[in-house]
Image: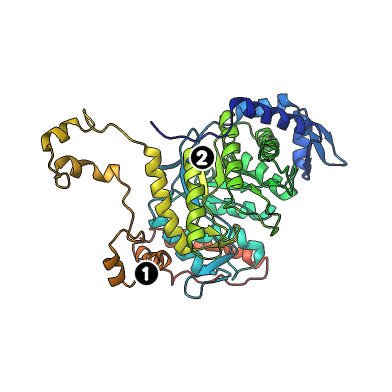
Amino acid sequence: MRPQFKILSDDLIQTILEEAHALLLDPGVRVHNQEALELLAEGGAQVDFDSQIAAIPEKMVQTALDTAPSDFDLYDFDGRPAVHYGGDAVHFDPGSAAINLLDHETQTQRPPLTQDFVRFVQLVEVLPQLDAQSTALICADVPEEIGDLYRLYLALNFIRKPIVTGAFRKDTWWTMRELLVTRVGGEKDLAQKPVAVFDVCPSPPLLWSDLTCQNLIDCARANIPAELVSMPLAGATAPVTLAGAVVQHAAECLSGVVICQLANAGAPIVWGGSPAVFDMRTGTTPMGAMGTWMIDCAYSQVGKSLSLPTHAYLGMTDSKIVDAQAGMEAAGGTILAALAGINMVSGAGMMDFESCQSFEKLVLDAEIIGMAKRLLAGIEAREETLALSVMRELGHRADYLTHPQTLRWFKEEFYIPSQVVDRGSLDAWERSGKHSAAQRAAARVEQLLKDYKPLALTDEMRAELRQITAKAAQSFGMTELPALDIFGE
């Protein structure tokens, strides 16, 4: 039996959806995109083009839900299904779009550079617990106008795993699509076997910006999966009650599903988000708060009730260094996300309110993810009898260590972490240098990076990807991209 966590009753889910539908009519949704407003009007919504507010009736929402796929696969760059969005499948990828990197040597945060991003995606490639990549860092050594497409360009030179990404502008979305099409071999290939999902983020409360709306429409028309990232902030930009924040999340996501399906019925869409409770003492948005986790688990349960694939940003910490708080918050969010059956859990490596990434935390989080996946596998009856046969065979002898049953099953029964998790004796720990978990993680980062195997991309493919990116960079004043040939490729 697989363990599961549900936080809402069926009656409360129904009430949440009823109130979300009521919000979509009054006060309606603000849509700052002309094309989306026209789609909504043609589809039956009552649209005030002057105020840019659309009142979306429940019938329109139901029509959109009827055409939205209940599941789909993301493929790796070798063409194999790698991530299944749908049902209770659970996958993990790093948190995305960090503007800082924690420098282990100095224990200070600094803007990430190209070489940092390359090392990060190489590390994700060799961590088996992580199922997908993300465009995890925003490089500071290129113009900010190409910060979104440049990180995707870098990743496409080094990754096999599928990738969670997103565009910061309307025009750069098209360059990012061109990069993906080039990498997989054609538009048809990208549509049939998607390798990337794009985050699209409505603004709380009840607003679709011009940029986000256009990204959502463009993804739908290209049949590229879009991941709704609604971000109600309970007590600040959303009702302070957790249930009230979930209602707002539902209204924002339902409106996103409608716009997506109006643009292209049947386009893949994910019910996701990154909500938080508001810490009124500090004016911050804690991702490691129990209230934040509860909103995430609740809205994912609502999404599942609508038969939609799900996503959440969980497993992060608000700590500024890799310490006890980081471990506590990462473990709590990761375990709850797994038990809630969220299809894609984004957050590994992330700290400081989604602003900073850490190589060392990523390695430690991978162990937490490994434990969470073991938890999901549950307890099984491995043999005809659970214990009777082996215990009668051995009687009162404690000789299980070398028994064939132990050798047969211990790797399936136990999750065995790497050496980054200290399970040795006190003497052994002292002899090895009395290293902390963060210090052991730093050493493991360097060991793992030696295992990365370069991709067999042709020179022509690399040149074409670089040419596309360089063209975009030139339009913002950058004449030459940072070199990549020093990063093991």
* The quarter of the displayed image where residue 44 is located: top right
Residue sitting nearer the eye, 54 or 489:
54
Judge left or right: residue 153 versus residue 205. Answer: left
* Residue 22 can be seen in this image: yes
* The quarter of the displayed image where residue 146 is located: bottom right
Pinpoint residue 201: horizontal percent, then vertical percent.
Answer: 66, 47
Q: Residue at x 64, y 34 (%)?
A: 264
Disc 2 marks a residue whose amino acid type is Ile
User: Are circles 1 and 2 on residues that touch, CB within 8 Å?
Assistant: no
Q: Residue at x 50, y 68 (%)?
A: 116
Instruction: Note whether 16 is above or below 328 in the view shown.
Output: above
Residue sitting nearer the eye, 373 or 160:
373
Dividing the image into 4 quarters, which one contains the N terminus? top left
The residue beneath circle 2 is 342
Q: Residue at x 60, y 61 (%)?
A: 355
Q: Which mark identifies residue 130?
A: none
Judge left or right: residue 399 versus residue 18. Answer: left
| Disc with the residue nearer the chain's start (1 vs 2) | 2
The residue beneath circle 1 is 435
